[in-house]
């Protein structure tokens, strides 16, 4: 349980090495190109026309990068919170919440040739005692009571009793 809570933090070492070896040299070469100089000249000219000091261009770029980093961090936090909420709403393994309709739609996993094994009872084998005799008597008495109270008519009583005696 503690291992799940204490996830190993991802180090920035690999990212820094990648930046130093691959990205920064390419960025420096791009800054030396004529296209980059022309692009910065166009941006500085646009800033002058709009009344902004062109010397603030590096500061504006850093500010834009910080804003993007903050937005990405916020997006990650929102996603993490949403994921945590969905995990808390999921039913546990012992819960049947929300699974009743799926159980009705799911086909029977047993094969058609499956036959349940015969239960064996040591007491029944030696004494011949029927453990379910009392239950059968109670069920028949209940059906008799229903007939007496008028909950079922004689035809329905006969059908229910016949079904019960045949274990349907």
Image (spheres, rainbow, N blue to C red):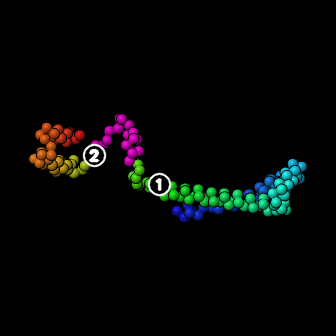
Would residue 61 appear left or right of 79 to someone viewing this image? Answer: right
Relative to residue 120, is residue 61 depicted above or below?
A: below
The structure residue drawn at horizontal position 18% and vertical position 41%, both measured from the top left corner, is 160
Report the residue at 66% width, 57% height from top: 72
* Local SS, label 1: loop
What x and y, as percent, mark residue 93?
43, 54
Question: Residues under labels 2 and 1: Cα distance?
Answer: 38 Å
Residue 58 appears in the figure = no
Identify the image quadrant of residue 110.
top left
Q: Residue furthest top?
A: 113
111 relative position to 135: left or right = right
**Residue 85 placement, left or right of 104:** right
Element at label 2: loop
In the rendered structure, find residue 20 and report the number of the disc placed on it.
none
Q: Earlier in the sequence, mark 2 or mark 1?
A: 1
> Looking at this view, is 69 or 20 the one in front?
69
Residue where numbered disc 1 is placed: 90
- Span shown in magenta: 100-118
- Does residue 18 show up magenta in the picture? no
Is 107 inside the magenta-drawn segment? yes
Residue 107, x across and y down, in percent: 39, 39
Q: Residue at x 71, y 60 (%)?
A: 67
Q: Main secondary structure of the magenta part?
A: loop
Question: Which of 70/156 is in front?
Answer: 70
Residue tagged by mark 2?
Answer: 119
Q: Residues within 10 Å of mark 2 (few under 14, many from 20)?
A: few
The image position of residue 81, as x and y in percent, is 56, 59
């Amino acid at each position: 349980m503690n291992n799940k809570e204490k996830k190993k933090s991802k180090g920035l070492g690999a990212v820094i090495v990648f930046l130093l070896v691959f990205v920064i040299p390419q960025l420096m070469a791009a800054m030396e190109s004529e296209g980059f100089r022309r692009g910065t000249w166009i941006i500085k000219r646009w800033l002058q026309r709009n009344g902004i000091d062109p010397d603030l261009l590096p500061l504006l770029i850093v500010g834009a990068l910080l804003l993007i980093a903050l937005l990405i961090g916020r997006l990650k936090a929102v996603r993490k919170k949403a994921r945590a909420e969905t995990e808390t709403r999921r039913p546990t393994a012992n819960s049947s919440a929300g699974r009743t309709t799926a159980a009705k739609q799911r086909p029977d996993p047993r094969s058609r040739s499956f036959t349940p094994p015969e239960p064996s009872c040591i007491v029944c084998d030696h004494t011949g005692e029927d453990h379910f005799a009392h239950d059968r008597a109670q069920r028949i008495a209940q059906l008799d009571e229903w007939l007496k109270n008028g909950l079922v008519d004689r035809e329905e009583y006969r059908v229910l009793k016949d079904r019960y005696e045949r274990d349907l």
